Each structure stands twice: as C-alpha cells, then as structure tokens.
C-alpha cells in the first residue's frame, strides 16, 4: 500500500465513463433519456476546428440539427458544469465512442440505476419504451433488482 506524502490533499481526479458503441449517437439518445441527462453540444468547438482546417468535414455528422463528431458523443448531468467554449461536461459524463466490433461478452463494468423506493417497475417500463430489454429479474437475500440491456446489449441494473 502506498501512502500520500505529507502536504496538501490532492484534488480528486476528473473522470468519465467511456462506452464502446456501434452507433454512438443512438446510444447517447438512449442514455440521455434513460438518465435524464443532456447530450453535449460540441458544435462551437467543431465549427472552430472546421474553420481552422484542423478537422475534416468527414469526421462530423449532423446530430439534432447541429454539427457533432462522427465517432463520439457524450451525455452529462444537466446540473454539472461544462465548458461553454467546447460544450464538454466537467462533471458526471458518459462518452460513447464508435468501435468497429460488436459487443460479444458480458460487461465487466455496468451502471446501477436507483429510481427510488417503489418506482422500479415504472422505471423498467419506461426504459423498455426507450429501447432497453429485460434480461433477468433478480431476487436474492441482499435485495431485488432487474438486469436490463441497452439498445446495443450493454447490461445495467435497476434497483
């Protein structure tokens, strides 16, 4: 075990969860709706990069009426800070990046959603309407939850 040297406590690290995706924008739409998050608007950054010749037009797509990166997009908690110059969130974020291969094995990392006491069934129904599917209903001494999959098959749980 390593210990911190004496002195000021270092600031916590900023992080985001990156999810491989076949279609990042569809995944962003699903998870933004599922979590009540906001899809990041990087259009100002993209327009700046395009005007400087630093980004080819082929690396962009139109997403909800604005330019977006073709191969990645993030969703962020609507109350968290973000950089207005780039649209990049500075708090809780999920980043979806395009990969060529499809998901083939069980996730080693997943999200647990906690809708609140007595709201699990309604939340599962809402998530199914967004495109998720129920994989299993778990009843164990430690609790009950529903294992679901997002539109690309990534598992998550609703407690």
Image (spheres, rainbow, N blue to C red):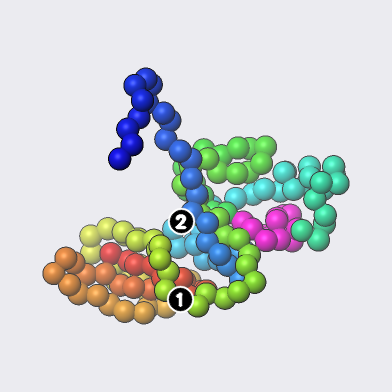
Nearer to the camera, 55 or 132 = 55
Nearer to the camera, 102 or 45 = 102
Residue visible at 60% across and 74% down in the picture:
101
For this orientation, the residue located farthest to the left is 141
For this orientation, the residue located farthest to the top is 7
Indicate yes or no whether the magenta region holds residue 133. no
The kind of secondary structure element at disc 1 is loop
Indicate yes or no whether the magenta region holds residue 67. yes
Badge 2: how crowded within 10 Å, few (<14), some, or many (20+)?
few
User: Can you say which quadrant of the picture contains the N terminus?
Assistant: top left
The kind of secondary structure element at disc 2 is loop
- Closest to the camera, between mark 2 and mark 1, is 1
Nearer to the camera, 42 or 118 = 42
Mark 2 or 1 closer to N-term? Answer: 2
Give the residues drawn in magenta, as a range.
60-73
Residue at which label 1 appears: 105
The location of residue 130, given as percent across then percent down, is 48, 71
Measured in 3D between alpha carbons, the distance from the residue under mark 2 to the one under mark 1, in whole angstroms, is 27 Å
The location of residue 86, given as percent across then percent down, is 66, 41
**Most common secondary structure along the magenta stretch:** strand
Residue visible at 38% across and 21% down in the picture:
8
Residue at which label 2 appears: 36
């Amino acid at each position: 075990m390593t210990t911190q040297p004496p002195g000021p406590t270092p600031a916590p690290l900023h992080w985001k969860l990156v999810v491989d995706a076949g279609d990042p924008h569809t995944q962003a739409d699903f998870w933004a709706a599922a979590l009540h998050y906001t899809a990041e608007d990087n259009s100002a950054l993209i327009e700046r990069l395009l005007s400087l010749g630093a980004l080819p037009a082929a690396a962009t797509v139109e997403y909800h009426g604005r330019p977006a990166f073709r191969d990645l997009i993030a969703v962020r908690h609507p109350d968290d800070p973000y950089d207005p110059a780039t649209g990049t969130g500075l708090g809780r974020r999920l980043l979806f990046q395009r990969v060529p291969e499809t998901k083939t094995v069980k996730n080693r990392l997943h999200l647990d959603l906690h809708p609140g006491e007595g709201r699990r069934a309604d939340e599962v129904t809402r998530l199914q309407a967004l495109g998720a599917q129920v994989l299993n209903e778990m009843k164990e001494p430690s609790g009950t939850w529903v294992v679901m999959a997002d539109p690309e098959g990534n598992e998550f749980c609703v407690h």
